[in-house]
Image (cartoon, grey):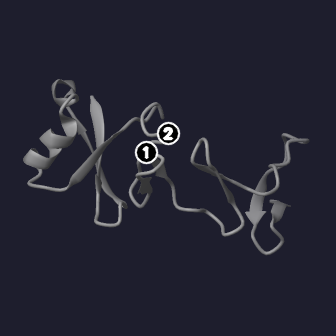
C-alpha cells in the first residue's frame, strides 16, 4: 500500500490516504483524478520518502522536499537534515525510573512526580 498526503494552498497536510500499490508510480496524478483535484505528495511511514511521515497539520517544505511537524514549543529547534524538532536541552537519561515533561517557561525538562 502507498500513502499520499493532500496539501492545501499553504502546503499544510489536510489528509493522508492509502492507495493500492498498483497506483504508486503515478500516485499523485491518480489521487488528483480519483479525489477530483488537490495537490498530492507521497509519504512513507518508514520515513524513507520526504524525511518524515505526513500527518494532518504538518507542513510540506518544497525546498527540502520534506514534511515537517508543527513546532511543539517555541524554544525547540529544527534539525535541518532530518526536519524534526528537538529541544534545546537533551532529555535527561540518567534515571530510567523517572519521567519528565518539557517546561517551556524554564526551557528545560521537569520531573513528573
Which picture quadrant has residue 30?
A: top left
Q: Mark 2 points at which residue?
A: 51
Question: Relative to residue 18, is residue 103 drawn left or right?
Answer: right
Q: Disc 1 marks which residue?
A: 65
Residue at image point 72% right, 66% down: 75
The residue under the point 8% across, 54% down is 36
Q: With respect to residue 50, does 113 lie above or below?
A: below
The x, y position of residue 94, in whole percent, is 91, 41
Residue 86, position as x, y percentages in the image: 69, 52
Dot 1: what SS? loop
Q: Could you tell me how far apart the alpha carbons at marks 2 and 1 are, in whole angstroms?
A: 8 Å
Do the numbered discs 2 and 1 sit on residues whose CB atoms are within 8 Å? yes
Q: Which of marks 2 and 1 is in front?
A: 1
Q: In this view, does 107 lie to the left or right of 51?
A: right
Per the image, label 2 sits on a secondary structure element best described as loop
Q: Is residue 65 left or right of residue 33?
A: right
Q: Is residue 19 above or below residue 61?
A: above
Q: Nearer the viewer, residue 9 or 92?
A: 9
Rendered image: mark on residue 24 = none
Density class for disc 2 (Cα within 10 Å; few <14, some 14-19, many ≥20) is many
Residue drawn 48% across and 35% down? 47
Q: In which quarter of the image is residue 102?
A: bottom right
Quadrant holding the C terminus? bottom right
Amino acid at each position: 500500500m502507498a500513502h499520499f498526503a493532500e496539501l492545501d494552498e499553504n502546503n499544510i497536510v489536510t489528509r493522508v490516504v492509502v492507495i493500492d500499490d498498483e497506483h504508486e508510480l503515478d500516485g499523485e496524478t491518480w489521487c488528483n483524478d480519483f479525489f477530483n483535484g488537490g495537490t498530492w505528495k507521497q509519504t512513507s511511514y518508514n520515513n524513507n520518502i520526504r524525511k518524515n511521515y505526513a500527518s494532518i497539520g504538518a507542513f510540506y517544505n518544497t525546498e527540502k522536499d520534506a514534511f515537517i511537524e508543527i513546532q511543539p514549543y517555541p524554544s525547540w529547534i529544527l534539525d535541518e537534515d532530518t526536519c524534526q524538532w528537538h529541544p534545546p536541552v537533551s532529555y535527561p537519561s540518567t534515571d530510567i525510573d523517572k519521567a519528565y515533561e518539557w517546561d517551556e517557561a524554564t526551557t528545560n525538562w521537569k520531573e513528573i512526580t
